[in-house]
Amino acid sequence: MKKILIPLILLFLVASTSFLVPIVTADASTLSQTDFQQPSFAKTVDYFDYARAYATLSGVSTPANFDQWHANMYMTYVNTSGIQLLYAGLENITTDGSSYMRLPAQSILMHYKTDDGKSNVLTASTFLMLMAFNDSSSSRFQNSPDIGDNLYASYSLGYDLSSIGVNLPSFNS
């Protein structure tokens, strides 16, 4: 599982902040270009459906049993009052359906114009929570962080969007 964790995180970050993953069909569990013209939507999509489509369209080889990989991505989009805001949260990842891993990664993308309407502003933020803890003798719930346990680490990752090689608004973060 560790071998796929790092590529999965990188693929999620690139896809969620630059829209490199293709948008294919429309219903409650897929995305279409027209979804982003709506005032809002909330969907749960399988991230690996898009990774498989991207691999097929790009001629990228995939791991064995890639058709059994699934990851729920919870998406909410708001397009109102001149602001476009996309939230995507990822969890319940599996490579075979027998066990699931929770990777609490959340990304937010926002676009709007400055007050004078002359400049575009683009912000992107990804929060990835990596938490470690140890159960203590006073743990109330075993295998879960709670009062009395030592908790460690929370991590927020960001990167310069100019590195993706496209023209960006003058205000971006």
Image: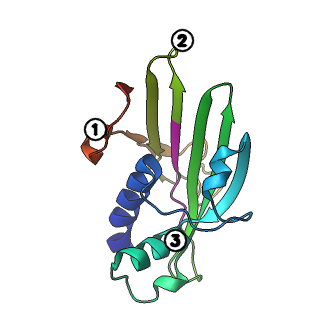
Left or right, 134 with respect to 85, comes to left
> Residue 102 in magenta?
yes
Q: Residues within 10 Å of mark 3 (few under 14, many from 20)?
A: many
Left or right, 4 with respect to 114, comes to left
Residue 60 x/y as whole percent: 33, 78
For badge 3, the amino acid type reads: Phe
In percent of the image, x 32 and y 73: which residue is there?
3
Residue 85 x/y as whole percent: 59, 36
Of circles 1 and 3, the one toward us is 1
For badge 1, the amino acid type reads: Ser
Circle 1 — which element? helix
In percent of the image, x 59 and y 83: which residue is there?
98
Q: Which residues are magenta?
A: 101-109
The residue indicated by pointer 2 is 115
The residue indicated by pointer 1 is 162
Circle 2 — which element? loop
Position above or below: 16 against 31? above
Q: Residues within 10 Å of mark 2 (few under 14, many from 20)?
A: few
Q: Are marks 2 and 3 in contact (CB under 8 Å)?
A: no
The way the protein has been coloured in the rendering is rainbow
Indicate which disc, 2 or 3, sits on the residue closer to the N terminus: 3
The residue indicated by pointer 3 is 48
Of circles 2 and 3, the one toward us is 2
For badge 2, the amino acid type reads: Asp
Viewer-proximal residue, 139 or 126?
Answer: 126
C-alpha distance separating marks 1 and 3: 26 Å
The answer to whether residue 140 shows anywhere in this view is no
